Amino acid sequence: YNLSPDRAAIEGFVRLQSINAFLNMITNEKDYLPTRTSYMLNLRGPSINVQTACSTSLVAVAQACQSLLSYESDMALAGGVAVFLPQERGYFYTEGGMLSSDGHCRPFSDGASGTVFGSGVGCVVLKRLDDAMADHDNILAVIRGTALNNDGAYKASYTAPSIAGQAEVIAMAQAVADVNPEQISYVEAHGTATPLGDPIEIAALTQAFQRKTDKTQFCAVGAVKSAIGHLDAASGVAGLIKTVLALQNEELPPTLHFEQPNPEIDFVHSPFYVVNKRTAWQRGDKPRIAGISSFGVGGTNAHAIVQEAPLRERSSDGRKRQLLLLSAKTETALQTMADQLADALAQPEFTTNNRLADAAYTLTIGRTQHPYRRVVVAANSAEAIQKLRDPANPTHSKQANPEIVFMFPGQGAQYPTMGRELYEGEPVFRAAVDHCAEILEPILGEDIRQMLYPSDPNDPAAADKLKNTGNAQPAIFTIEYALAKLWLSWGVQPARMIGHSVGEFAAACLAGVFSVEDALLVIAKRAMLMRDLPGGAMRAVRLSAEDLTPYLGDGVALAAHNAPHICVVSGDYAAVNAFDQRMAALGLDTIELHTSHAFHSDMMLPMLDPFREIVASVPRNAPN
């Protein structure tokens, strides 16, 4: 207002400029990019902006690795971005400057005259290797080690590169990664194609490698800048991404515009040669390893050692059927998604390579869950396509997040081969069954797996053996326990667990009341005590407990009230047969349960005292 008599106008102008300046700053200034990313993705770990000129993004990757190794973070996004506006623009060439005289970036070439800048963004997701493998992540490569340093004053000028500084950071990274230079078969160089930068970089690489080896021209060298230009702050991560893609595709891409080597570079006596054509980079007996360099104006140097991803063996006995899970916001969108998936599964890459399991995995792990859902079970692509295109296949609208309850049944539903397909195709289920079988064998004197999975499941003797309560109870517990372990391994956590008869012991075991060893001992001894009692029979009938009461007695007891109009009765054979006739006279069917005794009736009383002693002999805990 000292320059204008209108103080209010000046204050209004300043206030408006201040507001706009702040908004412009937080929406455009690079300092706010990491924190805005954290805000948008709800990331609550360190959110740090790095600015070391050309080495920015590889420095960010190195710092992210340290954050992971210190357990400050469990997952990290690291990278860089450089956007030059306007996109279509030229530059003035200056003799002796860093920019190319002809608009081409020619790393290590005799025609190199400087670099060409470009725009780009690159970002990588990082996790500790053990965590990534445990989470079944798609691992593209492994960063074995990184190193950072600065040239200090040991160079010609502030902007000049330093042989000593670069050599030191490369040797440090190799030491951190515990890698000998002879193990490295490719180096993604900084490769600016400047008359000063390229000779210094190869000299520094040579110096670092020759600390441990005298071998020459065994390691390929290249630079992505020849293809996409110098991406400034994003150049380091661009080199990392290129190297990872080369590992994945088992091929080294050529360094473009290279014909003859720069005469200032002594490749012949160095460990390096320039990749100037597409070159196979195949897996061998030892993992392929590469080095990646990125050097910033001002002297901040970064180097990373990257190794190919560990090979994962595919299970030779994979699931016979796959679950295809679809989810959408509307029923129409759900059907559209089903049609699109059917079209995709009809492509040769799925029909010829049997990649239905890959599609099922991606749909389960990599898709957002929405209210309208649909599941298709299929053994192959053709079956999946047919079911996906069937409009009669039901859809379900998820109204809320229901609590999950694990329910464990009792005797009567067991049969030979129950769970066989799971035993053959699900390692977690198989391991649980095997563990139970090993515990039970010295108690039963027999392998429970031979009862569950007989060589001839249609043999009546197999069904009779499993009907015997001495075998049935341990078998039912084993299957229930293994099924629960399988669901838990898939991340399904029950809010509650309930059981009926034998199933109560399975629920108690999984709730921590018994160890699995003690639970199997109790259930096997319980079964033996019951087996030694007189035989009997059980029937299910569709009557309420009140309506059933007049027909009880005469050796028939109410064993279970399973539902408002479903009850189970127990008794000796003659009494239960007479009960069948009374029900038939009323026009009611009875359902025979596959049991050998009259469980949950007075006929069980003689085994209670010895059973109490067995239960008292094992430790018991409060449910967890």
Image (cartoon, grey):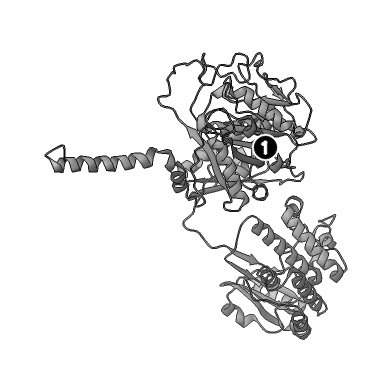
Q: How many marks?
A: 1
Q: Quadrant of the N terminus?
A: top left
Q: What SS does tag 1 mark? A: strand
Give x and y (percent) for residue 82. 47, 31
Give x and y (percent) for residue 70. 61, 52
Specify the amino acid type for callout 1: Val
How dense is the environment of label 1, judged by Cα within 10 Å: few (below 14), some, or many (20 and up)?
many
Position of residue 22 in the picture relative to residue 613 (left or right): left
- What residue is rendered at 60% in x and 39% in y? 149
- State the residue lying farthest toward the left: 5
Residue 607 seen in the figure = yes
**546 vs 221: above or below:** below
The residue that mark 1 highlights is 306
Instruction: Using the rendered view, name the quadrant where residue 183 is placed.
Output: top right
- What residue is rendered at 65% in x and 58% in y? 487
Give x and y (percent) for residue 131. 65, 50
Position of residue 492 in the picture relative to residue 180 (left or right): left
User: As rendered, which of 393 and 473 lies closer to the eye?
Assistant: 473
Q: Quadrant of the C terminus?
A: bottom right
Instruction: Using the rendered view, name the quadrant where residue 363 is placed.
Output: top right
Give x and y (percent) for residue 448. 82, 63
- State the residue lying farthest toward the right: 445
User: As rendered, which of 530 and 149 lies closer to the eye?
Assistant: 149
**76 vs 522: above or below:** above
- What residue is rendered at 66% in x and 13% in y? 260
User: As rendered, which of 346 and 78 lies closer to the eye?
Assistant: 78
Residue 363 seen in the figure = no
Instruction: Using the rendered view, name the quadrant where residue 517 is placed.
Output: bottom right
- What residue is rendered at 63% in x and 27% in y? 201
Position of residue 221 in the picture relative to residue 327 (left or right): right
**319 vs 123: above or below:** below
